[in-house]
Every structure is written in C-alpha cells, then in structure tokens.
Image (cartoon, rainbow, N blue to C red):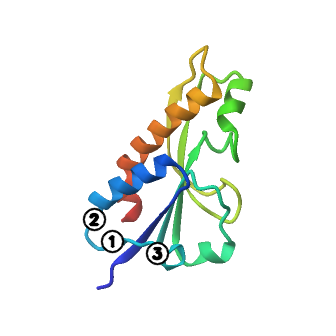
Amino acid sequence: MSLKKVYIASSREIGKKCLKYAEFNMPNGFTLCNIMEDCDIFISVMYDTLLEESFLKNRKCYNFHPGILPYYRGSGSFSWSIINEEKTTGITLHEIDKDIDTGPIICVKDFPIKENDTAYDLFSKGMDCIYELFVENFKAILT
C-alpha cells in the first residue's frame, strides 16, 4: 500500500503553524511531501497562487479562505466585511475547483466584528480561526 502524499501550500506564518501541526498529527497512510506536483492531496493555507485546471484534475484540493463564501470571494474580504457593515466574518474551508473560491463548501467558522475592528484586526483573528479550523478538519479532509 502506497502512502498518500499531502502538500500544504502557504506563503505566511499561519501556513508554517499548520504544517507543524500536520507533521505531528499525520494519520496512518499519509505523508507530507515537499514537491507540489507530487501530491495526492493539496491544502492551501493563505496560498497566493491560482492553480491550473490540469493540476486540479488529478488530486483533491482544499482551501482555507479568509472570508465567508459564497459572499466574499477573492481577496480583501475582511475590508469588505467592514465596509459593508457586517456583524460577523470568518473562514471558509472549501474544495478548490477551476474558478476562484467557488468549490463546494465544507464548513464555515465565523467570529464577530467589533465596532472598532480594523481589517488588520480581522486578519489577525482570521489567522487564529484558520488554525482552529485546520486542526478541527485536518484528518477529515485527508480521509
């Protein structure tokens, strides 16, 4: 039986934190890999590059999106949540498909927006929320 290879893509500190969690909590039958193209399962944690459709065809791909989908696709969702006077914002875990932030939603974890919150405040809270959502869902999305 060959191990399924998992690649965690990120260009941010939160990605490093999630990767460290994954290193110590990898279920049997799975291993982390260092080459994106070699993976069977791709996990995006604040990864800033769009994936080619050809890459998506051969593997399961997941994204921890900063914002509540389907309402806040793309970037800048925390700023837009403030501009639109939302009461909450959050993080969405979803499957990645060929379009931007349109894949099936697995779950959403929301948190309140306080009156004096800035987009940076929401970003900081969002990074904590991503980690919580990652820990809560890591083994489930692999299996």
x 52%, y 36%: residue = 126
Q: Toward the viewer: 76 or 61? A: 76
The residue lying at 66 percent from left, 44 percent from top is 70
The C terminus, quarter of image: bottom left
Real-space Cα distance between discs 1 and 3? 10 Å
Q: Is residue 42 above or below residue 130?
A: below
Q: Is residue 32 above or below residue 21?
A: below
Tag 1: amino acid = Phe
Q: Earlier in the sequence, mark 1 or mark 3?
A: 1
Q: Mark 3 Cα within 10 Å, few/some/many (few <14, many 20+)?
A: some
Q: Which residue is mark 2?
A: 27
Dot 2, crowdedness within 10 Å: few (<14), some or many (≥20)?
some
Badge number at residue 40 = 3
| Residue 125 x %, y % | 50, 31
Q: CA distance from mark 3 to mark 2?
A: 15 Å
Q: Are marks 3 and 2 in contact (CB under 8 Å)?
A: no
Q: Is residue 134 visible?
A: yes
Rounded to the nearest angstrom, the CA distance separating label 1 from label 2 is 6 Å
Question: Sequence-wise, which precedes: disc 3 or disc 2?
Answer: 2
**Circles 1, 2 touching at the beta carbon (< 8 Å):** yes
Kind of residue indicated by mark 3: Asp
**41 lies left or right of 143:** right
Q: Which residue type does callout 2 highlight?
A: Pro
